Amino acid sequence: MFESLGGRLQDALKSLRSEPRLTPELVEATLREIRLALLEADVNFKVVKAFVDRVRDRAVERGVLSSLTPAQQVVKIVRDEMLALFGEPGQVEAASADGGVVMLLGLQGSGKTTAAAKLARWMSSRGRYPLLVSTDVRRPAAIDQLSVLAEQASVRVHDPAGELDPVARAQGAIVEADRVGCDVVIVDTAGRLHVDDELMTELEAIKAAAEPCDQLYVADAMTGQDAIKSAGEFNRRVGVSGVVLSKTDGDARGGAALSVVSVVGVPIAFVGSGERLEDLEAFQGDRVVSRILGMGDVLSLVEKAEAAVSQADAAQLERKIRRNEFTLEDFRDQLQAVRRMGPLEQLAGLIPGMGQAAAGAGELDEGQLTLVEAIISSMTRHERRHHQVIDGSRRRRIARGSGRSVEQVNRVLKQFVAMRKMLRAVGGAGSKGKAGRRGRRASGPGMAQLMGQFGGR
C-alpha cells in the first residue's frame, strides 16, 4: 500500500543526506517534496499541512541545524511526526482478548464478512474461542458466505434457521456462545452503498442489545478519503472504537491510513494485507513507519518466520548448517516456508534496505520459486541429498522431468551451491558465540539471500 509513498519519501530524505550542510532553504525544498508525496498518496490536505508545519518547526531549530548529523535529525523528526499521525495504539486487542462482543460496521462491499472471518481466525490463533454471526439478512447469500468462511477458518458460526431479525440473531449468538464455551462473539452487520437512517437505526438496536466491547469500522483502503468520511459518519451516529483497513494489498495509495486518526479520531486496529484468511495483522504504527522510510521491519519478518517454521525445524536446520549438511531438500523446504510467509515483495520490504534494492532490480519473480521447486522435485532422493553426483546426463534427465531447460537446472544448482557456501560461512561465524546468536545470524542473511535469488532480471 505504501510502496509509491515510501519511494518518494525515501528519495526526498536521501537527497537531504547527501548535502554537507543543512540550511532552512534545503529543509523547505525537502518539505516541498514530502508535501507532494503525501498529497499524491491521497492524504487529507489538512493533515498534510499540519504535518509539514510540525516538521518545519522542529527541523529549523538551531540545535538541529548545528548538530553533527543534521540530516539524520530531520529523518528522526519525520519518523516521529509520522508516528504521531497514527496516534496511540488502540486497545482493541486487549478488550477483545477479555471476551465480549465485537461488532463490525461498514458500507456494502468494504469486506466486512471476510474481515469477520479473518478476525475470528486471528483470535483463534491466539487462544481465543470466537463465534461468528451474521445480521445481514438483506444481502443475498451474506449468511451463507460467512458460514463458508467460518468453516475455512475452523471456527464456530451461529446460524439459526428461519431467524431473519438482526437483533434476535445477535442475541441468540451471545446465548449460544455461553452455552458452547466461546469467549468472543463477532457480529457481521449489514451494509449499504451509502449511509442511511434505516441502517443506522438497525445498528443502534444491535448495539443496545449486544453491548459490544469493540465496534470496528471496516474501511476499503482503495476508496481513500471516501472511506474516512464514511467512518466519521458511523462514528458520529453509532460509535467506532477502531478501524480495520481492508484490501491494502491492492492499488491503495495509503492516504486513508495516514488520515484516519486525525480525521476520525479513532485508531487503526487491524490491516488486511491479502486474500487469505491469515492475511490480517494487528496494526502497529512504528513498524509501518519503518517500512515507509525504508528502515525495514525485522520484528514482523521474525514473526512471519516463526509462524511458517516450527522451532524444531529451525533447530534441525541450524544443526545442519553448522555441520555443513545443508541439502537440496532443505533448500526446497526453505523455499516452501518462504511461500507460506507471503508474497516476496512484501517480505523484501521487511528487510532493511532490501525493498529499494528489489525495486531497482525489478519485480521479484514468484514464478522462480515454482521453477526451483519443480526442478528439485524431479531429482531422486539420493541426488537431493548428494548434489555432487549430478553430472551432465542426470541434469538432462532432471530437465526433461521438470519441463525445464538444462540451463535452468544449472542455474538452480549454482544458486544452491552459492547459498550453501554463504550459510557455511555464517554458521562458522556463529559457532564462536552462543547458540541463540547463531540462529539469529543464520536466519537474517539467509532470508536476504533468498530474496536476492529470485529478483527480476
Image (cartoon, rainbow, N blue to C red):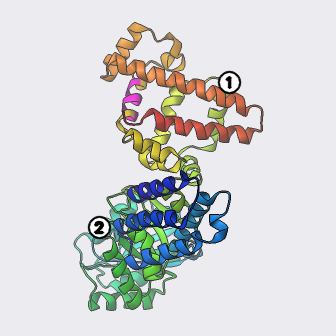
Residue 155: image location, x then y, percent: 45, 63
In reply to whether residue 226 is colored magenta, the answer given is no
Q: Residues within 10 Å of mark 2 (few under 14, many from 20)?
A: few
Q: Quadrant of the N terminus?
A: bottom left
The residue segment tinted magenta is: 369-375
Mark 1 residue element: loop
- Residue sitting nearer the eye, 432 or 360: 360
Residue type of the residue flagged with mark 1: Arg
Mark 2 residue element: helix
Q: Is residue 212 above or below residue 288?
A: below
Residue assigned mark 1: 323
Residue 156: image location, x then y, percent: 44, 66
Which is more N-terminal, label 2 or label 1?
A: 2
Residue assigned mark 2: 144
Q: Nearer the viewer, mark 1 or mark 2?
A: 1
Residue type of the residue flagged with mark 2: Asp
